Image: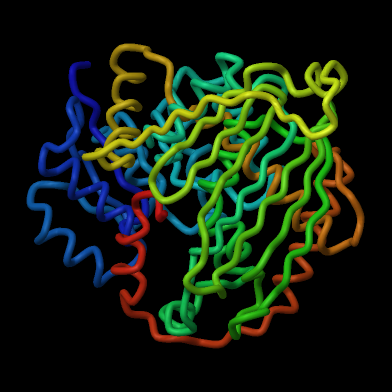
Amino acid sequence: MDKVRFGIIGVGNIGHAHASCIAKGGIRGAVLGALCDIDEKKREKLVSEFPGVKVFEKVEDLINSGLVDAVIVATPHYFHPVYGIAALEKGIHLLSEKPAGVNVSEVLKLNETATSSNAKFGIMFNQRTDPLFRKAKEIIEAGGIGEPKRLVWIVTNWYRTQSYYDSGSWRATWNGEGGGVLINQAPHNIDLWQWLFGMPAKVTAFCHEGMYHNIAVEDDATIYAEYENGASAVFITTTGEAPGTNRLEISGDRGRLVLEKNELRYTKLAAAERDFCFAEKSSAAIPGTEEFVYKFDNVRDGHELILEDFVSAVLENKPMIAPGIEGINELSITNAAFLSSWTGRTVSLPLSEEDMAEFDGLLEKKKAEEEFIAGATGAGGKETYIKRWSVNW
């Protein structure tokens, strides 16, 4: 195989963007093999827009067509593991949009299928390609901040108007999306949190549903997490605050990283803080510091980079920037946050079978009790989404 034939399952905003990019030859080693969407009017437009590309209504028909080597699943969240499993069981490579799903219990099944399959499994965590985050990870892994002590991320610039939520009846619903800001806007940030700082041992969270909008799901959330070594993390996000802030600060006993306004500031301590604290005779002294500032211009779109990285994994067996298996980490934090908020207790990670069962049951209750407010069904979210492709500083 010298080319990967991609099938796109779900040709909405992001699915269409992937299809267009591949069809135009924007991804080395990739060609567009087939498309699939349940919307009849959309399929009619796709036939004329992508001449010569087969368009399917049913996912199983695309998977069994022999026209694709890999699929990109860009459907609503609940279907990511469903269609992902169907593809992997046929030996078809899978690239899933984020999040990997809504329920950790379902994504574990997806991961088990991927492990037993010969097919590759990746996830569209495109912000892992951003050079600022990659540089931060490089510094941390090289011991640049020493023993991790604290992560604080205030990412409140996910502002959304009521019009955004009214643009489709599936938006911001337990039945449609499976959550609000944590499941829709913030998965990239939560993935980067654990990618840089590691997985916490305990999570306590406060998720406020419909705090700023007429929606059933959370539009404001604060997560407090604790680590085995005593470190902590605080994650604050909302879609109801303007102009909002995007500031990530990571501290250790040898230094600090601050990512804000499209730059990374690394402050390196001359001595380990714990050693300095007990050795220094002056009561007001602080360790000496050296500061480094990193900025990167002309950054290429991360979606394209993840696509090319995935193609390299398929054709050359190269390790992926964002293996699909790691999607369980981000979702575990999110599920734990919901469960903590709903029950008022601290939740341990990894989630136990009992916790997963309790989460699934409470989510089903939310879905059953939900009252839908029908909105317009146009493409109202497209322009907003495109603006969010890159890190929004």
Visible residue check, residue 152: yes
- Indicate the position of residue 218 as horizontal and vertical percent values: 66, 69
Q: In the figure, is residue 380 to the left or right of 88?
A: left
Using the image as rendered, state which of residue 205 and residue 61 is in the foreground: 205
- Indicate the position of residue 372 as horizontal and vertical percent values: 60, 84
What residue lies at 57% left-to-right and 40% top-to-bottom? 191
Q: In the figure, is residue 198 to the left or right of 16?
A: right
Q: In the figure, is residue 189 to the left or right of 364?
A: left
Q: Residue lying farthest right?
A: 345
Question: Which quadrant would the C terminus be assigned to in this image?
Answer: bottom left
Using the image as rendered, state which of residue 6 and residue 229 is in the foreground: 229
User: Where 277 sits versus 49, above or below?
Assistant: above
Q: How many marks?
A: 0
Question: Which quadrant would the N terminus be assigned to in this image?
Answer: top left
**Res. 198 image quadrant:** top right
- Indicate the position of residue 2 as horizontal and vertical percent values: 18, 17
Visible residue check, residue 109: no
**Res. 253 image quadrant:** top right
User: Where 287 sits versus 98, above or below?
Assistant: above
User: Where 39 sits versus 95, above or below?
Assistant: below
**Res. 297 image quadrant:** top left
Using the image as rendered, state which of residue 42 and residue 381 is in the foreground: 381
What residue lies at 38% left-to-right and 80% top-to-bottom? 377
What residue lies at 18% left-to-right and 66% top-to-bottom? 44
User: Where 385 sits versus 287, above or below?
Assistant: below
Q: Residue lying farthest front?
A: 282
Q: In the figure, is residue 54 to the left or right of 100?
A: left
What residue lies at 73% left-to-right and 74% top-to-bottom? 368
